[in-house]
């Protein structure tokens, strides 16, 4: 089964998910459109790491207009993972998504796409933006006027962080968390 949501569709294999607008409330109207795909053998509920031959990976693709939209997308993505990841990993993922999208909006001209992917061992977030400029370390402003806390936080929370150049001239900032 393959279902399409919002802007694009992801998947192959055994795609199972539900319409984003069902019970979405403000999230759907605020720009949380995207798609979920689950791939692997077997059937069952959307998620990664299901026992007994269930889905092996889960993907989510969207284009958040605000950091709040990205957090909502992350919550929805996490809600579909089975088994559910530990609370601390879920909190870290939501924080990473928020920081990466905020940085793309503030410093890189917006978000081209945000991808979330989970398998049995890890969850990865990739935020693609139109700017070729890589994130820069800087001394955080302790007065709160100019920030500087987000990039160091991303680097500390994630198991791995990578920045790769995209063919269109932009970049993808990828962060991985262990489940």
Image (tube, helix red, strand yellow):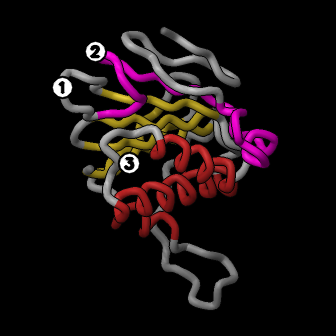
Q: Residue at x 27, y 43 (%)?
A: 122
Q: Position of residue 160 (x, y in %)?
A: 29, 51
- Tell me which label, 1 or 3, sits earlier in the chain: 1
Q: Which mark is residue 52?
A: 1
Query: What's the CA distance linking mark 2 and mark 1?
Result: 8 Å
Q: Residue at x 37, y 42 (%)?
A: 124
Up-down relation of residue 97 to residue 129 (above or below): below
Q: Position of residue 8 (x, y in %)?
A: 63, 19
Q: Assign a secondary structure to mark 3.
A: strand
Query: What's the CA distance linking mark 1 and mark 3?
Result: 29 Å
**Residue 15 painted magenta:** no
Up-down relation of residue 9 to residue 93 (above or below): above
- Image quarter of residue 29: top right
Q: Are marks 2 and 1 in contact (CB under 8 Å)?
A: yes
- Image quarter of residue 164: top left
Q: Assign a secondary structure to mark 1.
A: loop
Magenta segment, which residues? 20-48
Q: Left or right: 176 with respect to 142?
A: left
Q: Which mark is residue 42?
A: 2
């Amino acid at each position: 089964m393959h279902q399409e949501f919002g802007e694009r569709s992801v998947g192959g294999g055994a795609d199972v998910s539900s319409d984003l607008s069902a019970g979405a409330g403000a999230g759907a109207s605020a720009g949380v459109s995207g798609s979920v795909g689950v791939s692997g053998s077997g059937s069952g509920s959307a998620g990664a790491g299901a026992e007994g031959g269930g889905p092996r990976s889960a993907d989510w693709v969207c284009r958040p207009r605000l950091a709040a939209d990205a957090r909502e997308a992350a919550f929805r993505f996490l809600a579909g993972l089975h088994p559910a990841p530990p609370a601390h990993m879920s909190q870290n993922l939501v924080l990473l998504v928020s920081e990466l999208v905020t940085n793309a909006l503030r410093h890189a001209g917006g978000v081209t796409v945000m991808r979330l992917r989970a398998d049995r061992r890890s969850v990865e977030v990739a935020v693609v933006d139109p700017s070729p400029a890589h994130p820069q370390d800087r001394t955080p402003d302790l007065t709160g006027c100019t920030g500087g806390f987000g990039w160091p936080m991303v680097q500390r929370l994630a198991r791995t962080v990578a920045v790769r150049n995209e063919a269109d001239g932009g970049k993808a900032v990828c962060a991985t968390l262990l489940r």
